Amino acid sequence: MTETAIGIKDLAFGYKPSKPVVTIQEFSVAKNTHTFLHGPSGAGKSTLLSLIAGILTPQSGTIEIFGETLSQMKAAQRDRFRGDHMGYIFQQFNLLPYLSVEENIFLPLTMSPAKKNRSSSPASEIDQLLDALNIGDLKHQSVGSLSIGQQQRVAAARSFMGQPKLIIADEPTSSLDFDNRKAFIECLFEAAKSAGATILFVSHDHSLSSLFDASVSLSEINRQP
Ligand SMILES: Nc1ncnc2c1ncn2[C@@H]1O[C@H](COP(=O)(O)OP(=O)(O)O)[C@@H](O)[C@H]1O
Ligand SMILES: [Mg+2]
């Protein structure tokens, strides 16, 4: 069993191949750690996350997730792999406003048979996640009526549903003040601990780095040729 959650080698990607956005010789994230990746706006953070999630494919190089090489998979296999093994917290949350909190958190199980199989009791899993993220009282509310901070916690709870081993978070705290960011991140770690999940968390806000096991600057690992 590999101890590496994410392993990147000789990666090159540009939206136009002639104009590389991400060029990384080596970057790895150890299993069961909380890694912080920071860099200024436009540095390529979201692009790198899309490559790790297999939404984008690199022009060259390899990305291994739990020892499986994304570039050896066909597009449909990558979609399945992402659905089965990853949870994604988006900058804009991507919650469905006409569904309740509980229904939003349940969604990943409708999209991944593996997540559905792992979740022997979805109702109690939802309750545990609501507890870990301190939003138990919101269970039946419509997502459209929630504050930004509450939506963030729902998006985080949803990312853990079905016990994916890798949680990818793209600037989920950018609209909160420092105290609320810290509280949110602590909840995230609490949920990760009980799920045995690895977290890769991206932000332009360097001040959060002390909360994490490891902190990496994208500008340091992203070397343009
Ligand atoms: N879909 C896209 N098509 C073309 N260029 C893009 C696209 N998405 C992002 N870019 C460019 O790639 C660079 C990195 O963007 P991004 O990964 O979003 O940075 P960050 O998340 O660090 O702010 C920027 O110059 C951005 O304009
Ligand atoms: Mg971004």
Image: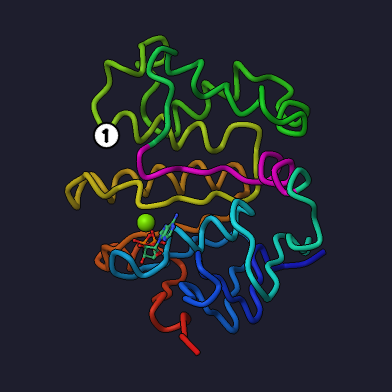
Q: Position of residue 141 (x, y in %)?
A: 36, 11
Q: What residue is rendered at 39% in x and 36% in y? A: 93
Is 108 located above or below residue 35 in the figure? above
Residue 129: x and y in percent read 50, 30
Q: Is residue 199 above or below residue 8?
A: above
> Quarter of the image containing the N terminus?
bottom right
Which residue, as the protein is rendered here, is positioned at the far left? Answer: 177
Ligand 1: which quarter?
Answer: bottom left
Of 140 and 12, nearer the camera is: 12
> Outermost residue, bottom direction?
225
Q: Residue at x 63, y 49 (%)?
A: 196
- Amino acid type, residue under disc 1 in the picture: Gly
Mark 1 residue element: helix
| Residue of label 1 | 149
Q: Is residue 4 above or below residue 152?
A: below
Q: Is residue 178 magenta?
A: no
**Residue drawn 53% across the image and 79% down it:** 23
**Chain part drawn in magenta:** 78-92
**Residue 4's spot in the image, x, y percent?**
69, 68
Counting labels gives 1
Q: Is residue 214 left or right of residue 52?
A: left
Residue 176 or 31: which is nearer the viewer? 176
Q: Is residue 88 magenta?
A: yes
Q: Position of residue 199 (x, y in %)?
A: 52, 55
Q: Give the residue displayed 76% in from the left and 43% down from the top.
A: 76
